[in-house]
Amino acid sequence: PGGTPPGHAFHLELHTAGMLQRNLCVRVELLCTCTREQLGEDMLCFLHHPEEELRRRQDPSLLHTLCTGASLDVEKTVHWFHQFTRVAWLLLPESRHWCLMLQPSSRSCKFQLSKDNESFAVEIVFGVQQGDSDISVGSQPAETGIPSTTWLQTYAVAEAKSFRHISRQAPQDSWHCKCLQLLTRFPTGAGFSSYALKTVGMHLLNTIPPTQWRGGDSRQRLMDILKYLHCSLETKQLHHFVLGNASFPMEISLPSGFRVAEPPNLFQHQASSLDDHAKAVQEYIHLLPR
């Protein structure tokens, strides 16, 4: 996630507080920079200089380039970065040997680099940090029809820091990292996602001591994961790992009220749909060892 450029402030405002996804708007405010100008910094104040002078001597503010109204626009941000990448790439020495192909995308920047028989794809998702916390809002792809001024709350940084916190306490022969990698590769469908499996794993990592995740414990830990998943399917309830988790490591910065909030239920769709629940149960059965 990125910070704010000089002369600007970002304010995150809640649009919708759904059970699984919080949608926010990033309102952009112009700030007075006259003091910085007086200190000799090469920047004109957006608020207190005539627009004609600003146009002549300085790049426009974000309100004029990346916003719709006063809200930071995902699609305009992606378009701007696409244009910037096209120009910047030609200035790099690598452009003489590699071919850059930008791919169409409205909420992220996707491109492919290729040379001879080598090729790899890159996707850049944009984000804005929520205050000084480890929570941010991102431009990650979402359901169709979402407004371009809507940003989705993401917990990826907090989750990664929590995993590192656990890893520091784990013995050298710990199996916990391979376990999570395995969970994200399990085949899943409409019943539950790989993120739900990862959430089960993180809950158990947070409750089972690190010393019990050695290689010799791998079979028992997998059985624990399947048992936890089975209980969650029976109750049609799987709590979010970050939001509403009172035992989340205190060294990781969360916005006020996050730890005591009502935890979203990742299996809410199963509670409201018998078909979804039946599909999830069938997928669970396919995960069981034969």
Image (cartoon, rainbow, N blue to C red):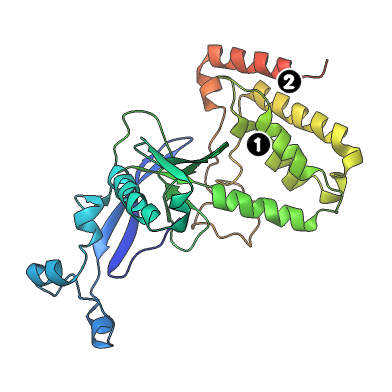
Q: Position of residue 158 (x, y in %)?
A: 58, 52
Mark earlier in primary sequence (1, 2) = 1
32 in relation to 278, above or below: below
Q: On screen, 246 above or below 5?
A: above
Looking at the image, is 28 positioned above or below residue 77? below
Q: Position of residue 2 (x, y in %)?
A: 42, 58
Q: Is residue 32 left or right of residue 155?
A: left
Q: Using residue 246 as the reference point, say whether residue 52 is left or right of it.
A: left
Instruction: Tell which of 166 and 93 is nearer to you.
Output: 93
Which image quadrant is residue 225 in?
A: top right
Identify the residue under disc 1.
Answer: 198
> Which one is in front, 74 or 263?
74
Position of the C terminus by quadrant:
top right
Residue that mark 2 sits on: 287
Observer able to see residue 247: no
Amino acid tagged 2: Leu
Quick one: 50 or 166, which is closer to the camera?
50
* Residue situated in front as seen by the camera: 112 or 10: 112
How many callouts does the rendering have?
Answer: 2
Residue 255: image location, x then y, percent: 49, 57
Q: Residues within 10 Å of mark 2 (few under 14, many from 20)?
A: few
Q: Looking at the image, which residue is at 77% across and 19% down? A: 288
Q: Is residue 187 above or below residue 213?
A: above
Which element carries disc 2, helix, strand or loop?
helix
Judge from the rendering whether residue 199 lies leftward or rightward of residue 16; answer left or right.
Answer: right
Q: Residues within 10 Å of mark 1 (few under 14, many from 20)?
A: many
Q: Amino acid at mark 1?
A: Lys
Residue 216 sits in quarter: top right
Position of residue 198 measured from the top left corner of the image (x, y, whole percent):
65, 36
Mark 1–mark 2 CB contact (< 8 Å) = no
